[in-house]
Structure formats: C-alpha cells, structure tokens
Image (cartoon, helix red, strand yellow):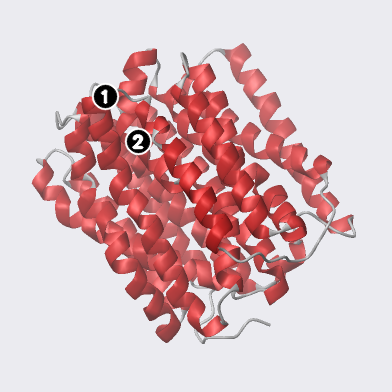
Amino acid sequence: MAMMDAMIVTTASTAIRTDFQISVSTLQWALNAYNITIAAVILVGVSLGERWGRRKIYNWGILIFTVGSVLCALASGIGWLILARIVEGLGASVMTPMSMAILTNALPPAQRGRALGIWSGIGGLALIVGPSLGGLIVAKLAWQWIFWINVPIGVVAIWLSRRHLPESHGQSNPINLVDNVLIIVAMAGVIWALSATTSSSDLAQLEVVFIIALISLGCGAWFIFRQTHEALPMMLLSLFQERTFTGGNLATACLYGSMYGVVFFLPQYLQASQQSTALVAGLELLPWTGTLVVVAPFAGRAVDRFGERWIATLGLLCQGVGYLLIAVLVHKNYGWFVLPLMLAGVGLSMAGPALQKSVIGAVPRVMIGKASGIYNVFRLLGGALGTTLAVMIFYQFRGANFASGFQATMVGTAAISLLGIVWSSRLRVEQRENM
C-alpha cells in the first residue's frame, strides 16, 4: 500500500497540477513531502519497533497512513495535500522497514535473498497496479479516489497483521527527539533549497535559499557529530565502517534516485507530448513496472547464487542504459519505448534485492531492524533528491516544449543510475552469513 501510494500519484499528477493550477516544481512536493517524511522519521519508527514490538508499530503505521489518506482525499489545495502527504509519510515510515525486519527475522540467512526477492516482487505489484489504477481512477472518477481506496485496504491489512504476523523485538534504545529534529531539518532543508533554485531568480530570495541551505547543512553536521559522541546513537555510524554496508546504501540511493526522477516525469511526458490519456499513460508504463513482479523473485535467487556485487552492478547498468535509450528515442512514437522500458525495469528488479541483501547481510542479526531503517533512509532520500535533480534539469533544458526538458531529464537520471556502479563495486563477491 505504501509503495502503491507513491506510484499511483504519478499518473494523477497532471490532473492534480491542472486542478490546483500549480507548476511542475510545486507539484514535486506532493511526492517529495511523502518521501522526505518517511526518510526523516524512519529511524524513530524503527527504534519504536525494536523497543515495543515490530508488529505493534507496523499496525500503528498502517493506521496513521490510512488516516493520512483520508486527509489527502479531502485536500482542497496543494498546501493541504502536502500536509496530508506528510501524515501519510509518518505512517509509511514504519510500514516498509518493519515488514522487512519481520520477514528477515523469521528466516535463516540462506533463504533471505529469495525471500527479499519475493518481497520486492509483491511490492512490485504496486508498481504495476499503481499507475494503471491511478489512470483509471482519474479517467472514470476523480484523482481524490486514489487516496480513498487506501481506507478499506488499511483496515484489512491491520486485521491480517494481528491475526498472522509474529511479534518480535530487537535492541531497545531510548528515542532521541533532538536527533530526529536535526535529521528532518537537514534533509528537508537541503532538498527544498535545491528545489527553490529552479523557480526563483530574485536575488533576495536566492539569499534566503542560501541561508536555509547553510542551516540545513549545519544541522546535518551537528547530527553526525552527535552520533559519534552519544552512548546510544540514533544512527550507528560504526556500521558504515563495513565497506559493503556503505556501498550498498549509496548504490541504493542512486538506484532509486534515478527511478523516482523517471517516475515523476514519464507519465507527464506521455500525457503532454504523446497525447495519452491518464489511463493509457498508466498502461504504457507496464513494460517497465511489470518486469519487477516477474524478474525480482528470480533475481533474489541469482543473488543467493552469484553474490550481490555482480547482480547489483548489472542491474544499475541495465537501468541506466534503458533510460539513455529513451532519451535518444524521445521524439519517436511510444512503440520505440517498449524495449528500453523493459530493460530499465529488469535492471531495477535485479539491483533492488541485491542491494537489500548486501545491506542487511552486512550487520549482526540483532541490528537487522536498524540496518533496514538506514537502508530505507537512503532509498527514500535518494528518491527525493533524484526527483529534485530531475526537476532542476527539466527547467534548465525544457526550451519551448515538454519533450526537450524530458529528454535532458532522462539523460540525467541515467547518469545517476550509472553512478551507482561506483558504489556497487564495493559489495562483496562471496556470500557470507550474518555475523
């Protein structure tokens, strides 16, 4: 449900932009507010799950997410929608890492690669259903219904979780609110400053942007300083001494930064330049998103057999090449995009499980919850930065039509994916049990 909510907004983005009469740079916050909130709060959510029970906090996350969905559906302006997306993000901040931790804790290390591949495949259903369902809802009802559908799903999910999921706990550490505020200000401030530079040319406004950026960077530096001097840090920086853990997280940021930039712009391009309806645009994403549910389970097995490094590197390469081909073929009709979209989807399907296993497998079993939280911070922060960078590139090169900006954006997102290969090369080749 959390992954679908990120995807379902994409095909409805044109309808939301038209309804609220807002720019592309403003629209990005309907996506970024959600991702930044999750990334900023996720470590607190993980700490709560480790301390009070993963299943219990997982269920609370679903409930908050469902309430946020109701608020999104009732939004009468972009400001209200952004605030409601923040509420959704608060709930989603524990849903994904707790599900990973519950799953991983229940299985021996030898089966985790396959299990995480299946987990990614089921999550990939959101990538398949989300855009198509969003397009169908916009075409037949109204964009608000993309949020109303979360309500019955949330109620059923809580009931199933209480009935079938085992409870588990991890390390119980006290929650430090100061650290959480620092990481929120650092991440949101930097991304807002980057976004603001695309829509502001006034010198006084740019000075404000610069000041906010400095404050955000200062909060980030203070956060890191505190983590090195606290007895029970919110984020264990010592984990980053493990080369595989660091490389896996940075490669993850590149993988999803590239993907989210495309997710934000591709449906808009199909509707603005290819003259597709919202429903057709959602269906046209299927060659890309549909590969996840098909390839991800097999990719998980391949990771178990061949190791994380080669599968992750090949996946990042395929995704980057797929986006580059779309940039080259941007002025062709849609039929030319099918194979590049499939190639990019295969790449994402391969790299995702490999990077998940590399990060979680690099830490002791008792630290699985923390590692899952950090992994998702990098995934979502990478996604938010990728979206913002894509918007910046779009405004720099859009010229007289949408297609020109989109072409440059695809080149930029491809470069982000290929950059991830630098970090995936740091992953281990041989398999290794958790310490």
Left of 184 or right of it: where is 233?
Answer: right
Task: Say how many tags the image has.
Answer: 2
Q: Nearer the viewer, residue 173 or 338?
A: 173
Point out residue 137 in the picture as x, y percentages from the top left corner. 27, 31
Residue drawn at (45%, 52%), measured in percent from left and top? Answer: 256
Q: Within 10 Å of the Cα at label 1, are there few (<14), some (14-19), or many (20+) other Cα atoms?
A: few
Circle 2 SS class? helix
Left of 266 or right of it: where is 106?
Answer: right
Q: Earlier in the sequence, mark 1 or mark 2?
A: 2
Q: Residue 322's quadrant in the figure? A: bottom left
Point out residue 131 in the picture as x, y percentages from the top left corner. 29, 41
Q: Which mark is residue 141?
A: 1
Q: Which numbered disc, 1 or 2, marks the residue closer to the eye?
A: 1
Point out residue 283 in the picture as x, y percentages from the top left corner. 19, 43
Q: Nearer the viewer, residue 313 or 270?
A: 270
Q: Is 41 above or below relative to 216?
A: below
Q: Within 10 Å of the Cα at label 2, are there few (<14), some (14-19), or many (20+) other Cα atoms?
A: many
Q: Tag 1: residue type? A: Leu
The residue tagged 2 is: 10
Circle 1 SS class? loop
